[in-house]
Image (cartoon, grey):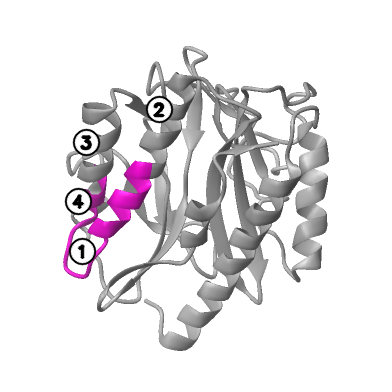
Amino acid sequence: LLNERDADAARVAAGKVVETHRRLAEFVRAGQTLAQIDAFVADTLEDLGCRSCFLGYRIPRTPAFPSHACLSVNECVVHGTAGYTMKPLEPGDLISIDIGVWHHGWVGDAAWTYAIGDRSDEAKALMDAGERSIAEGVKELRPGQPLMNWAKTVHRIVETEAGFHLTRGLGGHGYGRSLHGPPFVSNLPLGPLEWPDGNTLCEPGMLVAVEPMLAIGTGRTESDDRKWPVFTADGSLSVHYEHDVLVTESGPEVLTAGLHELPAVVG
């Protein structure tokens, strides 16, 4: 649980992520490759006095992550690398960009989805559901309330009301001086055996990264066990939204709230 000094450091790190997204929203356009976008992220992070906490990140039995950002296009849900596809972006593509930074020992970590040039009505509905679910879900992260309330809200908006599918097996996490830590924050209201952290109560000073991932056709995914990108099992469009949230005595403080001011369509 963070004290006020640590909370200020977390706010600054989150601000670096928001500023990187602001610059990306002006830079990204049709015709660019993921490698070009990743190089822009690297230059931006250097200019902002921080560095990627994704580059070189490892999990067991998986190669070190090779990119400065996670760049996931269309059916790629999360963890897209700069080299997983060489195809330039085209009008109508959706790209989810996940930025993670180290700044003076603290992590900032947030993702947003952008449409390139234009988008279909279905893509707009999917993006709207993702942005609305995270905006409404974070309101549930109040002191004394269980994490389950977040998941119930996100599930209601995405699956019950919008008719889309939350990605199974993926969710948010605690963070701070490390990129990942407890608690796990599911986007689905699972039982205690599947989600032991579901009844964890929010406390002032708790820092979590919450991140709905949703797709048009299915919540199931496919991936090569030795590679990073995760894809929808049916090849349908997906989106990813992620906020950094600090629980305070008066309620949730969304450290990356500035992402909601960014354009949904870029380039």
- Pointer 4 or 3: first along the chain: 4
Which dot marks residue 41?
Answer: none
Between circles 4 and 3, the one closer to the viewer is 3
Is 139 placed left or right of 179 in the picture? Answer: left
Q: Can residue 61 be seen in this view?
A: no
Q: Which residue is drawn at 54% across and 64% down?
A: 178
Pointer 4: what residue?
A: 149
Q: Does the magenta stretch include residue 144?
A: yes
Q: Tag 4: Cα neighbours inside 10 Å, few (<14), some, or many (≥20)?
A: many
Of the pair 95 and 149, the residue shown nearer to us? 95
Q: Is residue 65 magenta?
A: no
Q: In which quarter of the image is the C terminus?
A: top right
Between circles 2 and 4, the one closer to the viewer is 2
Q: x%, y% of residue 134?
A: 36, 47
Q: Tag 1: Cα neighbours inside 10 Å, few (<14), some, or many (≥20)?
A: some
Is 254 placed left or right of 259 in the picture? Answer: left
- Pointer 2 or 3: first along the chain: 2
- Label 4 to label 3, Cα distance in Å? 11 Å
Pointer 3: what residue?
A: 156
Principal secondary structure, stretch drawn in magenta: helix
- Pointer 3 or 1: first along the chain: 3
Q: What residue type is labelled 1?
A: Leu
Quarter of the image where one finds residue 79: top right
Pointer 2: what residue?
A: 125
- Label 1 to label 4, Cα distance in Å? 10 Å
The residue tagged with tag 1: helix, strand or loop? loop
- Label 2 to label 3, Cα distance in Å? 15 Å
For the record, the magenta segment spans: 132-151
